[in-house]
Image (spheres, rainbow, N blue to C red):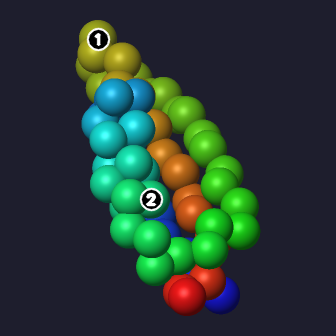
Amino acid sequence: MKVKIFDEESEKDLEFSINEFLNNDNYDIIDIKYCVSSSMFGEDQIYCFSAMVWYNEK
């Protein structure tokens, strides 16, 4: 079993990265965990969209 972690600044970027990974048919996906976090930097609110994919190589 292997793990791939994705971390992006927007939901669309995360979606694109995961879809690119999943388009490769060499993997059996076991599970995907999704997380959103936010923090403040001065007056700016920063978001982090991340996912962890558990998979086996075929």
Residue closest to the eye, 28 or 14: 28
Mark number, residue 19: none
Identify the image quadrant of the N terminus.
bottom right
Q: Quadrant of residue 56?
A: bottom right
Identify the image quadrant of the C terminus.
bottom right
Residue farthest to the front? 25
Q: How many marks?
A: 2
Residue closest to the eye, 2 or 43: 2
Residue farthest to the right? 30
Tell me how far mark 2 sits from mark 1, CA to CA. 37 Å
Q: Is residue 41 left or right of residue 31?
A: left
Q: Amino acid at mark 2?
A: Leu
Task: Name the residue: 32% across, 41% down.
Answer: 16
Residue closest to the eye, 10 or 21: 21
Q: Amino acid at mark 1?
A: Glu
Query: Element type at marker 2?
Result: helix
Is residue 7 in sight in this rendering? no
Circle 1 residues within 10 Å: few <14, some 14–19, many ≥20? few
Residue carrying label 1: 43
Q: Is residue 43 left or right of residue 19?
A: left
Q: Quadrant of residue 10?
A: top left
Task: Name the residue: 39% across, 48% down.
Answer: 19
Q: Is residue 36 above or below residue 45?
A: below
Q: Is residue 32 above or below residue 39?
A: below
Task: Name the residue: 71% across, 68% down.
Answer: 30
Query: Element type at marker 1?
Result: loop
Q: Position of residue 40 (x, y in %)?
A: 39, 23
Badge nearest the viewer, 2 or 1: 2
Is residue 43 in sight in this rendering? yes
Q: Position of residue 6 (x, y in %)?
A: 41, 56
Mark number, residue 22: 2
Task: Name the residue: 66% across, 51% down.
Answer: 33
